[in-house]
Amino acid sequence: MIGSGANINNLSQDVLKGLEVPLPSMEEQRRIVVDVDAEIAEIRSVGALIPRFEARIQGVLDHLLGNDQSG
């Protein structure tokens, strides 16, 4: 690691180098990636609906406020 350090007393690169960080197995990491990818796809799908619902809400507001141009 290259850097100028941090302002944390008693925490040095030597201390950090000695830390063992537990990691899940590769199989578990792959499963996590699949789950996260599925969640991201769902979020994007839901996000794509936002403009449609905004337009519907605006249509209802226009109708209620007498700004309805549809006749």
Image: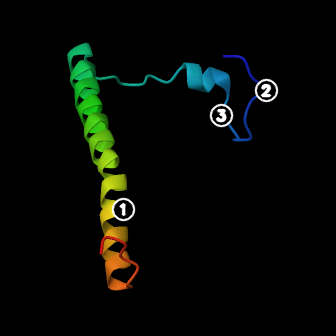
Q: Is residue 54 above or below residue 2?
A: below
Of all residues shown, which one is farthest toward the bottom? Answer: 65
Disc 3 element: loop
The residue lying toward the viewer, choosing from 47 and 16, is 47
Residue at 37%, 54% (x, y): give it. 51
10 Å crowding of disc 2: few (<14), some (14-19), many (20+) = few
Percent position (x, y) of residue 67?
Answer: 41, 79
Q: Tell me the amino acid under the disc marked 3.
A: Leu
Residue type at mark 2: give it. Answer: Ser
Instruction: Return the disc, 2 or 3, that comes first in the chain's sequence.
Output: 2
Q: Which mark is residue 11?
A: 3
Mark 2 falls on what kind of element?
loop
**Observer-nearest of 43 and 67:** 67
Query: Which circle's residue, 1 or 3, is located before the other in the chain?
Result: 3
The reply to whether dot 2 and dot 3 touch (C-beta < 8 Å) is no
Q: Quadrant of the C terminus?
A: bottom left
**Label 1 to label 3: alpha-carbon separation:** 51 Å
Q: Which residue position holds label 1? A: 54
Above or below residue 18? Residue 12 is below
Q: Separation of disc 1 and disc 2 at Cα?
A: 49 Å
Mark 3 crowdedness (10 Å alpha carbons): few <14, some 14-19, many ≥20: few
